[in-house]
């Protein structure tokens, strides 16, 4: 863990990780096997980050591909016809919308990391990260949809915008990290993702958020 950070930030992020897993579980019926896989994945990435494995950023290819490639493959696998249809069938979209509330504590964590010079300002809501808007509107949109106050088109549009925002932040986070292909943030690189527990942001929370958006969009398009 990063010693210069107050324990409250670490605990806030731990709770956010747990909340993400719980809400993902509640959003999907019959997801015990998936949850087991995600917990194992969390443990593997946590051990690697805690051991300092990702702190060596000069290797080619960068060690961080052990986060990006498996996470991407899990999303792709979940979108294959059989798995996609299973997910859509077992989807509780009225719950999955509320999952995006985890983006509020994520943004608070990111801002705290910026204040402690661990990420660039561009990755916060004071920079070009507008992802907190999805988190703030998630309970409102979720409640209105739950009460049948808004229709499919509104929820679909909200999901598309939310997907764009999280992908935009993801690319900014990668391109500002200390990798050979770093494009900006040289005065203050994104170093936080090399450490436990913040490795779980790109390894777990962001992939779950992206997958949730995509599946909900597909389900809504077929509603």
Image (cartoon, grey):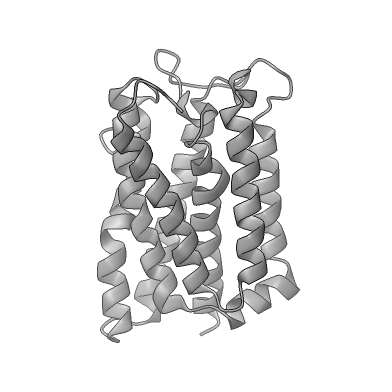
Relative to 33, say whether 119 is above or below: above
Q: Nearer the viewer, residue 126 or 71?
A: 71
Residue shown at 64%/25% (left/top)? 53
Left or right: residue 26 compared with residue 34: left
Q: Is residue 159 above or below residue 103?
A: below
Looking at the image, can residue 129 be seen? no
Q: Could you tell me which residue is drawn at 47 percent across and 72 percent down? A: 26
Q: In the image, residue 44 lies at what x, y percent?
A: 65, 42
**Residue 39 location in percent, x, y?**
60, 54
Image x and y of residue 47, in percent: 62, 35
Q: Is residue 107 visible?
A: yes
Foreground of the two, 37 or 61 = 37
The quadrant in which residue 118 appears is top left
Nearest the viewer among 92 and 38 is: 38
The residue lying at 48 percent from left, 23 percent from top is 191
Q: Is residue 148 above or below residue 219?
A: below
How many dots with numbers? Answer: 0
Residue found 37% across the figure and 55% down from its top: 102
Residue 151 at x, y = what percent?
Answer: 34, 82
Residue 83's quadrant in the figure?
bottom right
């Amino acid at each position: 863990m990063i010693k210069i950070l107050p324990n409250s930030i670490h605990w806030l992020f731990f709770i956010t990780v747990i909340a993400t897993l719980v809400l993902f579980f509640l959003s999907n019926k019959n997801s015990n096997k998936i949850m087991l896989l995600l917990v194992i994945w969390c443990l593997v990435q946590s051990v690697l980050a805690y051991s300092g494995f990702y702190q060596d950023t000069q290797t080619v290819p960068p060690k961080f591909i052990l986060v990006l490639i498996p996470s991407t493959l899990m999303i792709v696998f979940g979108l294959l016809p059989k798995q996609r249809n299973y997910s859509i069938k077992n989807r509780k979209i009225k719950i999955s919308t509320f999952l995006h509330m985890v983006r509020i504590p994520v943004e608070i964590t990111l801002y705290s990391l910026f204040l402690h010079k661990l990420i660039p300002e561009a990755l916060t809501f004071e920079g070009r990260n507008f992802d907190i808007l999805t988190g703030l509107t998630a309970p409102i949109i979720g409640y209105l949809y739950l009460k049948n106050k808004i229709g499919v088109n509104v929820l679909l549009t909200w999901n598309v915008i939310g997907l764009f925002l999280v992908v935009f932040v993801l690319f900014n986070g990668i391109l500002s990290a200390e990798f050979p292909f770093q494009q900006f943030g040289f005065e203050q690189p994104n170093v936080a993702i090399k450490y436990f527990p913040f490795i779980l942001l790109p390894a777990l929370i962001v992939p779950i958020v992206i997958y949730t958006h995509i599946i909900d969009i597909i389900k809504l398009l077929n509603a």
